[in-house]
Image (tube, rainbow, N blue to C red):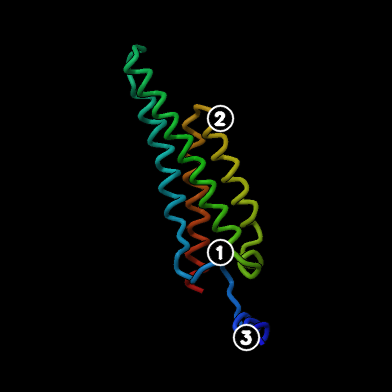
Amino acid sequence: MLDRIVARILTPRTAVSAHCDVPCGIYDPSEAQLSAKTVKAMFDKYAAVQGDDDAALNSKVRMITTKEKHADDCKRHLLVLWTDYFKQPHLDQYPDLSMKIKTACGTASKCKQEMDPANADLLIQQVDEIAEIFWATKKA
């Protein structure tokens, strides 16, 4: 008898489906955009540091650490959009979307590996393009 009660409690009565892990409305590319802009800001701040004393070195190390954290955050936010928000109909409508996300994630990695501010500018541009697609899909 206890088995039947437990089975009844654990057996769903209604079919449920969802297109994402949690309710809609939580996805937003602005976090990726902010992270990309922070990467760029750290490049700019790094370039403005004067001197080679301990204080200057400390500032540079902190800026590099922040740049790398935000480049990682940018990749993570993009991947969440790619894996949890964008679905096959979006990919059908924007066939280059997967490549755009892959390329932006690669650029974020370059921002971590290199000290070329042009990569940060490119990352902002790539993330903004993905954000435009995201918002276009929200309107549809």
| For residue 131, above or below residue 90 | above
Tag 3 secondary structure: helix
Q: Residues within 10 Å of mark 1 (few under 14, many from 20)?
A: some
Q: Residues within 10 Å of mark 3 (few under 14, many from 20)?
A: few
N-terminal of the pair, mark 2 or mark 3, is 3
Report x, y in % for residue 62.
39, 28
N-terminal of the pair, mark 1 or mark 3, is 3
Q: Quadrant of the N terminus?
A: bottom right
Name the amino acid type tagged 2: Gln
Tag 2 secondary structure: helix
Q: Which labelled disc corresponds to residue 42?
A: none
Q: Which labelled disc corresponds to residue 5?
A: 3
Q: Residue beneath label 1, please? A: 85
Tag 1 secondary structure: helix
| For residue 90, above or below residue 2 | above
Q: Residue beneath label 2, please? A: 113
Q: CA distance from mark 2 to mark 3?
A: 58 Å
Circles 1 and 2: CB atoms closer than 8 Å = no
Name the amino acid type tagged 3: Ile
Circles 2 and 3: CB atoms closer than 8 Å = no
Circles 1 and 3: CB atoms closer than 8 Å = no
Report x, y in % for residue 60.
39, 23
Is 78 displayed left or right of 95 in the figure? left
Is 100 displayed left or right of 68 in the figure? right
Q: Nearer the viewer, mark 1 or mark 3?
A: 3
Q: Give me the residue at 60% from left, 41% from top.
A: 106
Report x, y in % for residue 136.
50, 66
Q: CA distance from mark 1 to mark 2?
A: 28 Å
Q: CA distance from mark 1 to mark 3?
A: 37 Å
Front one among 137 and 64: 64
Is 77 displayed left or right of 4 in the figure? left
